[in-house]
Amino acid sequence: MHTDQAENNRISFGFAVLIWAIVLASLTGCGRCKYLNQTEDYSPSGERVVANTVINCAAFGHYITQVNIRRATAAFNDKEGLVVSLEDRQTVVTVWKDDRNLIVYLPKAAVKQDFANRSIIHQLANVDGVEIEYRTL
């Protein structure tokens, strides 16, 4: 009887390790995210860069469109300087008014007033001292 219990514990432990590995792989995307840079524009002084990027992570099975701001000397990082992110592939246009003001044009469908139809995941009005103004295409 003691041997059967030890065998059951070993199987349960192995199953728990397998489940944990699957969860970790899904959270990290197994490193299979693809970043498709649509546009990258420098601010008038060249101090900052705004990047419009489409991300496809196999673990999540769908696309995300996002806009990030960073210093021109910094490498791209999809988790830093996040301005806005939207479900799916979206057409987003960004225009620098000056070094501290950015206009982001979003698809009209993305900014519908009905919460259920809205595809915006994340949206900020100020990122690292840059004021963000949103308009529709």
Image (cartoon, rainbow, N blue to C red):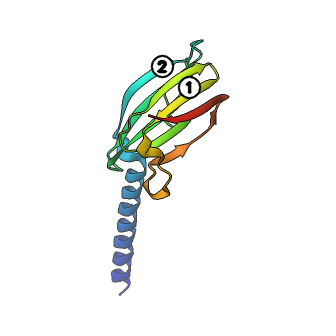
Q: Amino acid at mark 2?
A: Asp
Q: Position of residue 42 (x, y in %)?
A: 52, 17
Separation of marks 1 and 2 at Cα, in angstroms: 11 Å
Q: Position of residue 20 (x, y in %)?
A: 41, 60
Vertical order, 79 against 48 (above or below): below
Extreme residue toward the top, this view? 45
Q: Position of residue 55 (x, y in %)?
A: 38, 38
Q: Amino acid at mark 1?
A: Arg
**Residue, x 38% and y 51% (percent of image)?**
25
Vertical order, 41 against 88 (above or below): above
Query: Which label sits in the foreground, 1 or 2?
Result: 2
Q: Secondary structure at mark 2?
A: strand
User: Which of the two discs, 1 and 2, labels the residue nearer the N terminus?
Assistant: 2
Q: Is 12 displayed left or right of 81 in the figure?
A: left
Extreme residue toward the right, this view? 129
In the picture of the structure, the residue carrying the numbered disc 2 is 41
Residue 35 visible in the current orientation: yes
Q: Is 83 displayed left or right of 108 in the figure?
A: right
Q: Is 17 displayed left or right of 47 in the figure?
A: left
**Residue, x 38% and y 34% (percent of image)?**
91
Looking at the rendering, which quadrant does residue 130 occupy?
A: top right
Q: Nearer the viewer, residue 120 or 50?
A: 120
Query: Residue 70, labelled with which disc?
Result: 1
Q: Position of residue 137 (x, y in %)?
A: 44, 34
